[in-house]
Amino acid sequence: MNFKKLLTIAAAFTSLTASAQLMQKKETYTRADTLRGLLTPLRTCYDINYYHLDVKFDIDKKYISGSNLFKFTATQNFTKLQFDLYANLKVDKVEYKGKEVPFTREFNAVFVTFPKAIAKGAKEEFTVYYSGNPTVAKRAPWDGGVVFTTDSLGKPWVATACQGAGASIWWPTKDHQSDEVDSMLVSISVPAGLKDVSNGRLRKTTTLPDGYTRFDWFVANPINNYDIAANIGDYTHFDDSYMGEKGKLTLDYWVLPYHLELAKTHFERDVKRMLKSMEYWFGAYPWYEDGYKLVETPHLGMEHQSAVAYGNKYRNGYLGRDLSGTGRGLNWDFIIIHESGHEWFGNNITSKDLADMWIHESFTNYSESLFIEHNYGKEAGLEYLKGTRKNIQNDEPIIGPYNVNKEGSGDMYYKGGNMLGTIRATIGNDEKWRQILRGLNSTFYHQTVTTQQVEDYMSKQAGLNLKPIFDQYLRHTKLPELDLKFENGKVYAKWTADVKGFNMPVKMRKKDGQFYLVKLNTEWAPVGLPGLTKDNLEVDTLEFCINVKTE
């Protein structure tokens, strides 16, 4: 992800979970953007139930060929539907009931016409056969596509990464986040001597007569199509298990052979304490049926469901750096914690529209400070979270434009995470806050959601109207400003904000005393704490991400 104006360190971090199509400033939108981002009747007419993706990788030619079976339920009567495949890949044919059916293409959208109307409620299927040279990612995961490279021994190493760009950059699919397939079989054929690691569990390995080997991976849970991954290389495997909230969770690690001993030590240290922390805050790991995997990749990392991509080179921090500048980020591997956090926010709970991508990134950014808190104490977690504020840009709203496959500002990371910390401080009850986080994951378990659903749920469970806070942080660019003035021995305070009637409480105290939650709005009002002066007044800017101005 690239920001309009960006610190170098912020650029590194915010780009790690997406492609170059993300975080690019864009003011005009095209027909192609609408075809990609809008839920038209040609997309809502069918609900995806099952895919069988069967793809062969010719690595030398950087060429792929294969098919995808679409099984669906009709949500209305229709004769025509849309699926998606990037225009540089050829649709060889579309088969329905054993016969080819006509199709047309417009940009990256493909429109299939059936010989007669498919009735609402019918369960039908069709298969798309395709081939071509997929987009080659030049700097994944910053840009979407397929990585074709070699490991340090010169052996082929291939990976896919396509968030934002969309799964249709390498396979035919209904490419919209709102419709997650219920289950999926991923069959990847690779040259002999190599292995493929994809999502879910390995069902079968088949030696093919043409010198290829096919790996069949089955995903038993709903999955978003950008999470589907092919990781091809000279992998070796080791495993472990974790006794979690739902019992025994299998842990599988696929790494390059010369990193085996290093990986055993490094992964053992962070994975289990990550799971312990995330399950404490967010509830049970959402994919016990599919297991948890870390897969070493030639790119930095991605939250591929049940097959998390790992490329942090076995270092603490983010490529050896602490993104908060506090030192708190150097005791753990950033990619393991952050990308695994997406198993809850991003994979378990997925935004219907890319405009609401903050649901993925704000909560997962916040999960880093919760991990620190769980392992090193609340103060440490708060210090880390506050330290990340230096990367806030306040450039554009966090929520992006809807229906054009476009996210909002990269502030969804640091500013969004700090917004959540601010809401926690506003609620003022840590256990209630934990139950809200866990409740989100149980209430919206394996679902796609909107911002409104998340906001409404959190307000209801908090017993507070959080809408003004969400509006200011998500829909406007500026942080709320706390204005203070001192007159006739009294302290007065008010908020300056874009949101009319902004009324977030904030903690204040007399120096070294106890913090009190003070209710304020956009009108000047006396602060009812005795003994306050200009010299001893302290505002809690550790927990509250705000600006403070003294007149």
Image: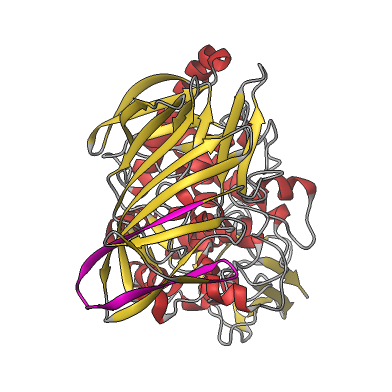
| Residue at the farthest front position | 99
As drawn, 300 above or below 104: above
As drawn, 410 above or below 379: below
Relative to the observer, which residue lies in front, 181 or 115? Answer: 115
Q: Is residue 450 left or right of residue 535?
A: left
Q: x and y percent of residue 298 in the render? A: 62, 32
Instruction: Name the residue at 49% across, 53% down.
Output: 130
Task: Please state the extent of the stretch shown in magenta in the rendering.
Answer: 105-130
Query: Which quadrant is home to the C terminus?
Result: bottom right
Instruction: Name the residue at 62% across, 55% down.
Output: 414
Residue 533, can we see it? Answer: no
Relative to the observer, which residue lies in front, 375 or 155? Answer: 155
As drawn, 547 above or below 232: below
**Quarter where residue 256 is shown:** top right
Relative to the observer, which residue lies in front, 150 or 275? Answer: 150
Relative to the observer, which residue lies in front, 497 or 15? Answer: 15
Query: Which quadrant is home to the N terminus?
Result: bottom right
Q: Is residue 23 left or right of residue 213?
A: right
Instruction: Name the residue at 63% across, 53% down.
Output: 19
Q: Is residue 97 left or right of residue 231?
A: left
Q: x and y percent of residue 166 in the render? A: 54, 58
Instruction: Name the residue at 61% across, 78% down.
Output: 31
Is residue 106 one of those drawn in magenta? yes
- Per the picture, the main secondary structure of the magenta-coloured stretch is strand
Residue 208, can we see it? Answer: yes
Q: x and y percent of residue 285 in the render? A: 33, 42
Is residue 122 one of those drawn in magenta? yes
